[in-house]
Amino acid sequence: MTLEFILGILQIVLIATTPLVFAGIGELVTEKSGVLNLGVEGMMLVGAVTAFIILVITGSYFLAFFVSILSGIIMSGLFAFLVLNLMSNQIATGLALTIFGIGLSSMLGKQYIGTPIDGLSPWFFVIFSFVIVFLVSYFFYKTKAGLILRAVGESHNSAHALGY
């Protein structure tokens, strides 16, 4: 194995796992606040397909990135509405949103199968994933809001007794 081969594998791994870092950080914040969201995969798929569609239509990577964030927010809002307002089970709702996301992304992306895109260096997103890991870590362990969020996730009743 040559050094070029090892560096190529490392490059592929970093690029391929970057979306998982973003989803994992989002789920970490959710879990620390005491919510179990099993719909992350569905949210990722909807975000990915909307980003790809916007990228094909506009050619803007940054617009595609922000539209994928917006679609994730919409899916998360749907989860929050179902769990908080309609009092549905978090586990069942998360699994249902995963299945819904798989179906919706398949339906939306069907006409774009095989569509090539011009390549932009994905290193901005890789670097941003490292930065966001450190920012979330700083938030949780160095700020008062992070401490409150962790306290609410650990013991809702104790945090409520303190006024949070």
Image (tube, helix red, strand yellow):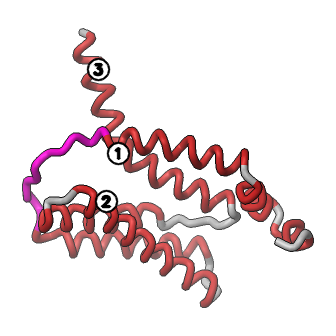
x 10%, y 53%: residue: 117
Q: Earlier in the sequence, mark 1 or mark 2?
A: 2
Task: Classify mark 3: helix, strand or loop.
Answer: helix
Q: Earlier in the sequence, mark 2 or mark 3?
A: 3
Q: Earlier in the sequence, mark 3 or mark 1?
A: 3
Q: CA distance from mark 3 to mark 1?
A: 18 Å
Q: Position of residue 42 (x, y in %)?
A: 40, 66
Q: CA distance from mark 2 to mark 3?
A: 27 Å
Q: Amino acid at mark 2?
A: Phe
For marks 3 and 1, give the one nearer the viewer: 1
Q: CA distance from mark 1 to mark 2?
A: 9 Å
Horizontally, is 158 left or right of 150 in the view? Answer: right
Which range of residues does the magenta coloring cover? 112-123
x 61%, y 74%: residue: 90
Q: Residue furthest right?
A: 161
Q: Residues within 10 Å of mark 1 (few under 14, many from 20)?
A: some
Q: Amino acid at mark 1?
A: Phe
Q: In the image, is residue 4 above or below residue 33? A: above
Q: Are marks 3 and 1 in contact (CB under 8 Å)?
A: no
Q: Which residue is mark 3?
A: 7
Asked if residue 134 lies in the magenta stretch, the reply is no
Q: Position of residue 31 (x, y in %)?
A: 64, 59
Name the mark on residue 125: 1
Q: Position of residue 162 (x, y in %)?
A: 90, 69
Horizontally, is 132 left or right of 90 in the view? Answer: left
Q: Quadrant of the N terminus?
A: top left
